[in-house]
Amino acid sequence: MKRKIRLLLLPLYLASLPIMLAQEESAVIVDPPRISKTVVTNWVLLEVRYTVRYMDGYEPRWDLAEPQSLSFGVWELDPELGNKLIKENERQKENKNKKQDQNSKPEIEHYVDLVYYLRHIGPNKGEIEIPEQVFSYVEPGPKGQYAGREVKQVKVPGIKQNYVSTLTKDADDIKDVMDFGSFKKQERAWKISAVAGFLASVAILWLLIFRKPVVSRSERKKLKAGRVSPVMAENQIILKPNVARRLLAKQIMSWSANLALDKTNPEKVKKELCNLLRDQFLPAYVPEMLDSDTPREIRQKIDKIPSSRVRGLLTIVSNHLEYHDDALYKQSGWGGVGTDLQALLKTVKSLRPERIFWFNIKARAKKLKTSSLKMLARLRGAK
């Protein structure tokens, strides 16, 4: 019984279907795509054209129809023409197919062609589908204002495009063979030269830091004269710091040995030491020093030296000079000369460039550690 009733209602449904379709007529229609070529090959430009028809008042969403907003599957957008939406043949006409009242305004139908440029390259030939596309539009309202307006969509079926590839499966094997030979010998030579260059640069660096100062012939004559008598003549040249340091260290060791064997007296050692410090050693580090400078003036000139470590050590040496000058003036304090010489020798050896270098490295590391600990303490206090 139910089956018979369904069969009787079927003709009525089919008869009302055209009326229902007519009521659902869309205000925006997009025709199926038209292509510029029936067959394309590798990277040949293909033009795909969609014709959009829309009634007056409705507004297509052109921003959503940009090439980057659509999906074309395996097809790629042309680098020059395909990155921007191209609109052509914009026109309008009166819709005469729709019945209108005598007093109503005629309905205007707008037309525009949306053009997309595609390319493709691949090894397989056959039919490649241009996928289905979806175009959006909004209901009538203020032009350009999309807020609060209902957005509707129109789907356009895809289309298949014949593609003939000029590539072969063995295309990767088609190549010109160019044999340049083996580069293992060159590689080994480059590695050896790189290691040798690195070692040579390290050796040169160490030589520059710890090299023995070059002493001219005239300076050697002056040094020989200085070994006999530490007291310098008025026309004596100013020695280089390293030369003066080595000369003073050697002389201090000689004095210490003579004092231990009682071959000399402390007063003579003090006189020779003061002359050597004032005439040779200190002028090597402070060239602007004068013979008439007092210990205080000497320290003021020492304070102008950039290196803080060198300033501190030379200040200690100037203190020794002041102490022994005062002892000679007062004719007292002859005891403990050997101990003073050993303390002075330790200070002089600390003026060696490599020791100053490592001292500065340690000082910077200590300063960095202290600042890091303070920062950690601040962070913990902030928490």
Image: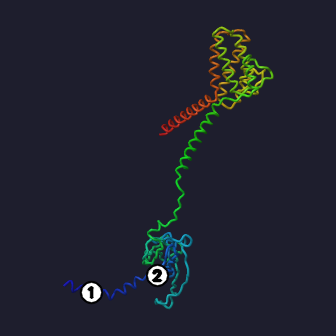
Residue 27 visible, this orientation: no
Q: Residue 68, image x and y in percent? A: 50, 69
Which corner quadrant of the image does residue 157 belong to? bottom left
Q: Residue 98, image x and y in percent? A: 46, 89
Secondary element at image label 1: helix
What amino acid type is highlighted by mark number 2? Asp
Residue sitting at the far bottom = 102
Tag 2: Cα neighbours inside 10 Å, few (<14), some, or many (≥20)? Answer: some
Q: Nearer the viewer, residue 264 or 53?
A: 264
Q: Which mark is residue 9?
A: 1
What amino acid type is highlighted by mark number 1? Leu
- State left or right for residue 214 relative to residue 59: right
Residue placed under numbered mark 2 in the picture: 31
Q: Is residue 307 above or below residue 195?
A: above
Q: Residue 184, image x and y in percent? A: 52, 50
Q: Nearer the viewer, mark 2 or mark 1?
A: 2
